[in-house]
Structures are given as C-alpha cells and as structure tokens.
C-alpha cells in the first residue's frame, strides 16, 4: 500500500482495503480513492502520506516520502426537523427530461448511509459538457418551501465538482436553489440557499438537478443523500382557514388545500415544519 493516513501522534489509521478505487480519471491522469475503517474526528490534525514505493504507469518510482498535513472541519449538527429518513426510495430518475445524459438511476443503498439502514444513491453518466441530470421526488406534495424556509440533507459527495440543486415548482414556475458543489468525498450536511425563491410564493419540492461542470471526474459518478430535513412556514395568505379541508390523504400524510401539510408519525400529528399539531 503506497498511502497512509496518520494521526497527530504518527499512528497509522486503518484503511478499508476493499474500498480502493482507481483510474476514474481520463487518460494521462491517475486517480485513487479509499475509505478509512473509522471516521476522522472533527477539528483534529492528520497527515496524508505518499510513500516512495509509489510508481507511475512507466514504473518510475516516487523515491521520496510526501507528507500532506490537513485538519478536519466542524461537525455541523442540523437543527431542522426530520421529514424523511430515506429508508426507501425518495427520488426516481428522470432520464426523459434530463439533457445530455447516457444514464441516470436511483436505488436504495445500504453500504453508504448516514443514519438508519439505507440512503438513496443517485448515479449518472453525462454525454456532453452541458448535461443536466434530473431526479424527481416521488411525492412532491410532501415538502413545501419559500424564500423564508430551509431545506437540508446529508450528501455523500463523489468529488466530481458537479453542482447539485433543489428543484421547486408552482403553477408552471420552476426555480432552483443551490444545495452544494460535490467537491468532496464523504458525508456532509448541506442546506439549500432559499434566497433564489421569490418572496411571498410557496413552492413544492420537485426533486434534485445535477449540473455537469468541467472536471476530471465529472462525467460519471454516484452520490448518496440521506435524512431530508425541512423548516417551512407557509406564507400567511396561503395558510388554510380550516385544517380539516383535506383534498388528499395517505396513511401518514394529509395534503390540505394550498399544499399545507399534516404529517402523522407514530400517532402524533405534525405540520410541515415539524411542530406538533394539537
């Protein structure tokens, strides 16, 4: 093994030998990715070490040790109410309305999850530099948003540098709020910038859009999302006057006129921002 991760005392951290991935980059470039057995601690110093035994495709050795120090960041704990743990499919691939893609897919995934037993893994392959991959929410009525609301989720990045957006719609008007750039690997909690939505208008959360960006690893990949969280307070003019004026219902979710929601979990009734309804 030609790489190591060391803690501040010089102790080597155990690497998951089955996690190594090679050669995802185009010709003339090399790429390797791997995972540690245990997560790194937040706000802690480490070093990444390249050993002299590393060689290129022509068998030319590195011949020296390269040590790269780094420090982990803050461990951000979300405060938004949990709306969906993503133990089942929350999204479905929309290849028909995607542009410049060879493939898009969604599956539940148990090998990478932030909490619970599963996450949603979203995979893609672009066919041109200006590609956009769409992943639709299976139940758009579950999540509402406006310029004052918040939407967050955990995202396992694929180091593609592609941009990920939340997609919103109301009465034919479609808007996008940026969730993050996938310029990292591993789990990070991400919140959408909701300031892109017009003031005073409530939108349904329609899904996610991934926008292709020029990068060595951006043509194809997969990322995971988990634990969707939302804070939503309907605009006053859109709040129903009668909470029993139900237009549709499932076992756990009542959709009221104007898109206002009641969510029933374990016998307790919540509104869309996670507050208990008496």
Image (cartoon, rainbow, N blue to C red):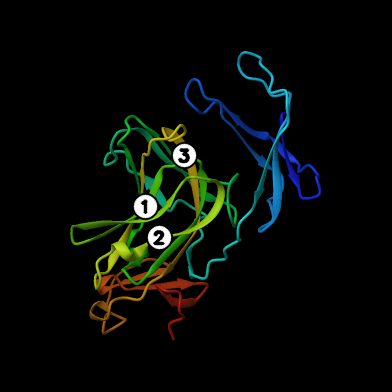
> What is the number of the mark on residue 192?
2
- Residue 185: image quadrant is top right
* Label 1 environment density (alpha carbons within 10 Å; few <14, some 14–19, many ≥20): many
| Between discs 1 and 3, the one toward the N terminus | 3
What residue do we see at 67% from left, 20% from top? 55
Q: In the current view of this chain or complex, which residue is farthest to the left?
A: 172
Q: Are marks 1 and 3 in contact (CB under 8 Å)?
A: no
Label 1 secondary element: strand
Cα separation, mark 3 vs mark 2, equals 19 Å
Cα separation, mark 1 vs mark 3, equals 15 Å
Q: Is residue 239 above or below residue 70?
A: below
Q: Quadrant of the N terminus?
A: top right
Residue assigned mark 3 = 160
| Between discs 3 and 2, the one toward the N terminus | 3
Q: Are marks 2 and 1 in contact (CB under 8 Å)?
A: yes
Label 3 secondary element: loop
Residue assigned mark 1 = 165
């Amino acid at each position: 093994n030609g790489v190591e991760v060391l803690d501040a005392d010089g102790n080597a951290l155990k690497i998951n030998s089955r996690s190594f991935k090679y050669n995802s980059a185009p010709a003339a470039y090399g790429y390797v990715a791997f995972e540690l057995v245990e997560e790194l601690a937040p706000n802690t110093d480490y070093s990444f070490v390249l050993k002299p035994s590393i060689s290129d495709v022509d068998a030319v050795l590195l011949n020296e040790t390269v040590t790269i120090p780094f420090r982990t960041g803050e461990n951000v704990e979300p405060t938004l109410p949990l709306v969906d743990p993503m133990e089942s499919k929350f999204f479905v691939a929309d290849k028909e309305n995607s542009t410049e893609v060879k493939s898009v897919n969604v599956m539940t995934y148990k090998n990478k999850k932030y909490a619970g037993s599963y996450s949603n893994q979203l995979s893609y392959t672009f066919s041109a530099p200006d590609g956009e991959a769409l992943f639709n929410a299976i139940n758009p009525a579950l999540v509402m948003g406006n310029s004052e609301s918040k939407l967050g989720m955990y995202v396992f990045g694929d180091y593609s540098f592609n941009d990920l957006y939340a997609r919103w719609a109301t009465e034919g008007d479609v808007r996008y709020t940026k969730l993050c750039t996938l310029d990292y690997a591993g789990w990070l909690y991400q919140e959408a910038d909701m300031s892109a939505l017009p003031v005073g208008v409530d939108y349904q959360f329609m899904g996610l859009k991934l926008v292709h960006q020029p990068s060595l690893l951006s043509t194809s990949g997969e990322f995971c999302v988990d634990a969707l969280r939302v804070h939503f307070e309907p605009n006053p003019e859109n709040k129903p006057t009668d909470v029993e004026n139900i237009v549709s219902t499932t076992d756990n979710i009542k959709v009221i006129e104007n898109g206002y929601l009641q969510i029933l979990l374990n016998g307790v009734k919540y509104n869309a921002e996670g507050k208990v309804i008496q």
